[in-house]
Each structure stands twice: as structure tokens, then as C-alpha cells.
Amino acid sequence: MSHGHNRNFADHFEFALDRVFTAAQPIPVTEWISDHLTLDSDGSTIDMTVDGTTPKSFAYTVPAGKLFILSRVIWSAADLDINYLNWFGFGAALANGCVMKANGDEFLHALKTTIEFAHLAGADLPILAINRGVIPDAMVIRWSLFKAGYVPIFDSGETIEFLVQDNLTEMDHFECVIQGRVFDA
């Protein structure tokens, strides 16, 4: 049976009740995952400060024989003079933006400004430093899908992708971690 990614709440009930994922449910250590999205899903290249004028894919592919429930996406960024109306410390918004995809389908609209991340994160957007031009500011953006009551389910071989479509080489730091539960299909 192909589950695809969860498009509505009723999809949660395809599994036995012990497989419904909530923040309060204990997760065995063997099923917890906190992994970086990596360049072309290579498992090692996490640095998203790439020249994405030719789009670059940072992805996670669900292992064979497993299902994955995505509960949170965390981006960390450092850049000089972070501004909410621009793309971090850039002097403007991105032209093309960065897009989150699930199995090739757009899962999240193109993000072109820092404030668009703020809209995802709500109160989960700590600014670690505001140095105003002295050293880079740092932000951690936590997009907690489970807090919105939405936890997509991915089948074996399916991918979660963050597509960088602009040149981000001038950023000091940019990477993405996904968290959730991976278990036998």
C-alpha cells in the first residue's frame, strides 16, 4: 500500500493506533531521526550556501522498507545584518527563492525573505545574536508541523527536498535538519 505524504488528517488512521504520532507519544530511540538534508541526498554535504543559479537539491530519502513521519524542519542560518524583509543579510529578497518539495511536488511555497521563515516558525524563531554589522547574526527557524496538527507520512524511497534556486554563497552559514520518526513499513 502506498501512503504518499499525508494530505489530510484522515490519512493518520490508515495505521494502527500505536503508529499515530503525537508529540506526547514516546518514540523508541531506534525510530527517532534527526538528520540533515544533504546535497542530492548524498548523506554528507549539508552546507546550503551554494550557487543555486542552477537549482541545487538538498534531500532526505526514506530508507528501503521504512516509513517516515516528518514532525519538524529546522533551518540554521548565520549572516551579517539579518533583516526580515530581505533574505537574511542580503540587501534584497531572493529572485527565485527556496522551495520545499515532497516527492517532487511543491510542499511549501518559495521562500524569498526571512519573514517568510518567521511565518512558518511562529514563536519558534530564536534570534541568537543581533550584532548590527560586527559579527554575523544567527537564527534558528523551527517549523513544527506537529504543532499545526499536520504530520506528513513518507513511504520507502520517497524524498523530502529543499531546493535552493538562488546564489547563497555570500551567506556565512545555512543548513537544514529534519526530525521525526522512521519505522518498519
Image: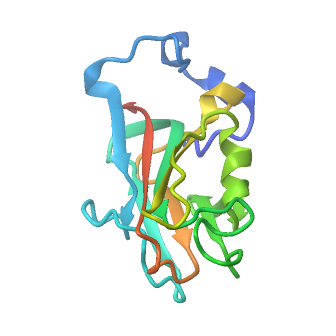
Examine the image and state in which quarter residue 43 appears.
bottom left
Can residue 104 be seen by looking at this rendering?
Answer: yes
In the rendered image, residue 122, in percent from the top left (x then y), is placed at 70, 37
Give the residue at x 52% y 11%.
24
User: Does 175 sit left or right of 102 as displayed?
Assistant: left
Can residue 108 be seen by looking at this rendering?
Answer: no
Looking at this view, is 173 or 111 the one in front?
Answer: 173
166 w.r.t. 119: above or below: below
Give the residue at x 58% y 69%.
89
Give the residue at x 42% y 68%.
48
Looking at this view, is 11 or 114 the one in front?
Answer: 114
111 w.r.t. 143: above or below: below
Here the colouring is rainbow
In the rendered image, residue 20, in percent from the top left (x then y), is placed at 55, 18
44 w.r.t. 29: above or below: below
Looking at this view, is 162 or 79 the one in front?
Answer: 79
Q: Quadrant of the C terminus?
A: top left
Give the residue at x 69% y 45%.
120
Examine the image and state in which quarter residue 179 appears.
top left
User: Does 73 sit left or right of 97 as displayed?
Assistant: left
Q: How many marks?
A: 0
Examine the image and state in which quarter residue 40 appears.
bottom left
User: Does 38 sit left or right of 22 as displayed?
Assistant: left
In the rendered image, residue 113, in percent from the top left (x then y), is placed at 70, 65
User: Does 182 sit left or right of 85 as displayed?
Assistant: left
In the rendered image, residue 10, in percent from the top left (x then y), is placed at 73, 26
